[in-house]
Amino acid sequence: MGSKKGYFFKKKLTLFAFVLPGAAFMTIMIIFPIISNIIMSFKNVDLMNFATGDSHFVGLKIYQKICRTEVTWIAVKNTLVFTLWCLVFQFPIGFLMALFFGQDFKGAGPLRAVNVVAWMIPMVAVAGVFKYMFNSDIGIMNRILMGLHLIQKPVEWLAHGNTAMAAIIIANIWKGVPFNMILLATALTTVPQDIYESASIDGATRIQRFFYITVPLLRPAIISVLTLGFIYTFKVFDLVYVMTGGGPGSSTEMLSTLAYRYSFSEYNFSQGAAVANILFVMLMAVGMIYIHIVTREDEN
């Protein structure tokens, strides 16, 4: 009896030893910073008292100040506009590419690999390349458009609000399309081919097979891809910071760049923490909606 208990104890101890490093990493790198950030947003922490710890509790005053600041609502609007426009384009394009590369044709494998490589390029590198491409003096974008006689003179893409927003949206779409394609292409491989064959025998067209077979069977994957795409796009920072820095003015200011500006440009750490917490709560709400939808799908 004692040896049996000892066996189970050793087994649990072994499992605990495997879980402990991951749990410690999560606590130190994720949970602790989140809790510290929440606490900081309720204090008046700035450059003068950050190291000394002389800050004091101010309650919701920081959040009230942020909500009364115009740039906060500009950042919220810009973040939503940026996210929605990116999803509107990158998801359908990624879906079409997944369907295309899902076909059996010569060269499909290497072309899929190229798209995977494009997705693996760091966002900072992508932002740097697109910033060069949209440069008004030496950028290739103006040269192409002028060569096609679509514009008469170079456009200062990153110097004006609307064109700067369009530029970062295009860059993010280019980065996001391979991500959508990879996940949807993987999901397509799980669809039984005999269903398509039966539908073809019954006279269903390609469009009918797509809307009545592919889309319904991929519904869980589609919801997952859209949710992940929304989260990754909504919290974008490096792309915007490198290409525009949130400018010109506040025309491309996102919640993430606003939190950075408050914390590391103006050294108002409390306001930066509060904006980051608002961003965190919004993304957590999206995650909870996703979990609710998935749970309901499983129950049905």
Image (cartoon, rainbow, N blue to C red):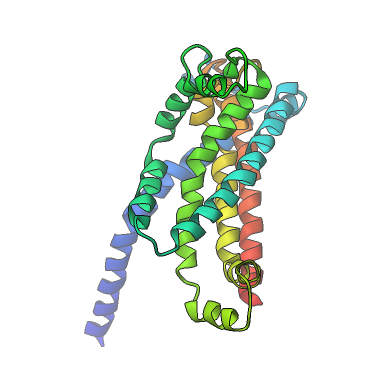
Give coordinates of residue 196: x percent, y percent: 54, 77
At x 56%, y 19%, the residue is 146
Task: Locate residue 157: give its quadrant.
Answer: top right
Of residues 107 and 239, the one nearer the viewer is: 107
> In the rendered view, would you say 209 is above or below 49?
below
Of residues 160 and 236, the one nearer the viewer is: 160
At x 55%, y 55%, the residue is 95
At x 50%, y 39%, the residue is 174
Q: In which quarter of the image is the N terminus?
A: bottom left
Of residues 53 and 106, the one nearer the viewer is: 106
> In the rendered view, would you say 201 is above or below 63?
below
Give coordinates of residue 19: x percent, y percent: 34, 60
- On the rendered structure, is 121 left or right of 67? left
Of residues 136 and 13, the one nearer the viewer is: 136
Give coordinates of residue 112: x percent, y percent: 38, 52
Residue 41 in sight here: no
- On the rendered structure, is 110 left or right of 285? left
> In the rendered view, would you say 96 is above or below 134?
below
Residue sitting at the far left? 3
At x 64%, y 35%, the residue is 82
- On the rendered structure, is 203 left or right of 143? right
Q: In which quarter of the image is the C terminus?
A: bottom right
